[in-house]
Image (cartoon, rainbow, N blue to C red):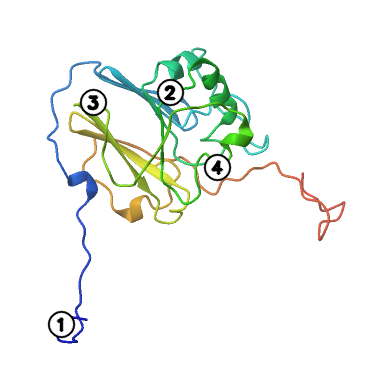
C-alpha cells in the first residue's frame, strides 16, 4: 500500500550479479588457461598461477556402491588435488562430495580451501560422522563474487528447481567467464550469462543408484529386482 492507501505494483527485475563490477576480456598467453578433465564431474582448472578443482570424486564408490567411476583418473590425481589453491564442491551427492577422496586429501593437506554454497541442506552435513579432518571449509552466499586474486574470481549460484541442495558456478579469469552448471536442473532459475568462453554441462539425467535391492512389502521373491 502507498501513502494514499492505494495499491503499489512493483516489477522485480534485479540486475544480474555477474554484471556487477564488469570486466572486459583481456589477452591470454598460450597455455595461460588449461582445463583438464580428470573423471566424472571433476575438472582441474589452471588459471594463470592459480589452480582450481571441481567436485573431486577420484577414488572409491558412490551411492552405497551403486556407482563406480567410468573413467580412471590420472595416476597423479592426489598430487593435483594437493597443489590446488581451492576446491569447489557443488552439492552433497556422493559422486560430487566424495569422502573417500577427501580423506586421502586431508591426510596430506587438511587446510586446503574448499568452497560450497550456502544451501539449506548443508553440503558437509555429515562431516563429523565421516571422520575426515578438513579445517578450511568456506560456506559462501549466492550471487557474490569471491575474489581469489586480481585476475581470478568466482560466483556460486543456486539451482531453480532444487535450491535447497544444488549449485552451479561461474569462474572469471581476466574477464573470460567459465560456466559449470554441474547437476542443476534449472541453474539460477534460467538466468545465466549470455556470453561465456566455456560452458560445462552434465551428460545424463534421471540417474539413480542402480543396481538396487528391494525386499518385503509388494516385492515377492520372484519379483524382487537386484
- Occupied quadrant, residue 69: top right
Marks 1/4: CA distance?
Answer: 47 Å
Q: How many marks?
A: 4
Mark 2 vs 4: CB contact within 8 A: no
Marks 1/2: CA distance?
Answer: 54 Å
Disc 3 crowd, CA 10 A, few/some/many (<14, 14-19, 20+):
few
The residue where tag 4 is placed is: 125
Quadrant containing the N terminus is bottom left
Q: Residue 189: give x, y in percent of width and height.
A: 35, 56
In this orientation, which residue lies closer to the viewer: 95 or 99?
99
Q: Label for residue 3?
A: 1
Q: Residue at x 61, y 45 (%)?
A: 208
The residue where tag 3 is placed is: 149
The residue where tag 2 is placed is: 112
Disc 4 crowd, CA 10 A, few/some/many (<14, 14-19, 20+):
few
Label 3 or label 1, whichever comes before in sequence order: 1
Secondary structure at numbered mark 4: loop
Marks 2/3: CA distance?
Answer: 16 Å
Report the residue that reaches farthest toward the bottom: 5
Label 2 or label 3, whichever comes before in sequence order: 2
Report the residue that reaches farthest toward the right: 221
- Occupied quadrant, residue 98: top right
Q: Residue 197: give x, y in percent of width and height.
A: 24, 34
Amino acid at each position: 500500500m502507498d501513502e494514499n492507501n492505494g495499491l503499489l505494483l512493483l516489477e522485480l527485475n534485479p540486475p544480474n550479479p555477474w554484471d556487477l563490477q564488469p570486466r572486459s576480456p583481456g589477452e591470454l598467453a598460450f597455455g595461460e588457461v588449461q582445463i583438464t578433465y580428470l573423471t566424472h564431474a571433476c575438472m582441474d582448472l589452471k588459471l594463470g598461477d592459480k589452480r582450481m578443482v571441481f567436485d573431486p570424486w577420484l577414488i572409491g564408490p558412490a551411492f552405497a556402491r551403486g556407482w563406480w567411476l567410468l573413467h580412471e583418473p590420472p595416476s597423479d590425481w592426489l598430487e593435483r588435488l594437493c597443489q590446488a589453491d581451492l576446491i569447489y564442491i557443488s552439492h552433497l551427492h556422493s559422486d560430487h562430495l566424495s569422502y573417500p577422496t577427501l580423506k586421502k586429501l586431508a591426510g596430506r593437506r587438511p587446510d586446503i580451501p574448499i568452497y560450497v554454497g550456502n544451501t539449506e541442506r548443508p553440503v558437509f552435513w555429515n562431516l563429523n560422522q565421516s571422520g575426515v579432518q578438513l579445517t578450511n571449509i568456506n560456506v559462501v552466499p549466492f550471487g557474490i563474487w569471491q575474489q581469489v586474486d586480481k585476475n581470478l574470481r568466482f560466483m556460486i549460484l543456486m539451482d531453480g528447481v532444487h535450491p535447497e541442495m544444488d549449485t552451479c558456478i561461474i569462474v572469471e579469469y581476466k574477464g573470460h567467464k567459465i560456466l559449470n552448471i554441474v547437476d542443476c536442473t534449472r541453474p539460477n532459475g534460467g538466468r545465466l550469462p549470455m556470453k561465456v568462453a566455456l560452458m560445462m554441462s552434465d551428460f545424463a539425467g534421471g540417474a539413480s543408484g542402480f543396481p538396487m535391492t528391494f525386499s518385503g512389502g509388494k516385492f515377492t521373491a520372484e519379483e524382487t529386482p537386484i
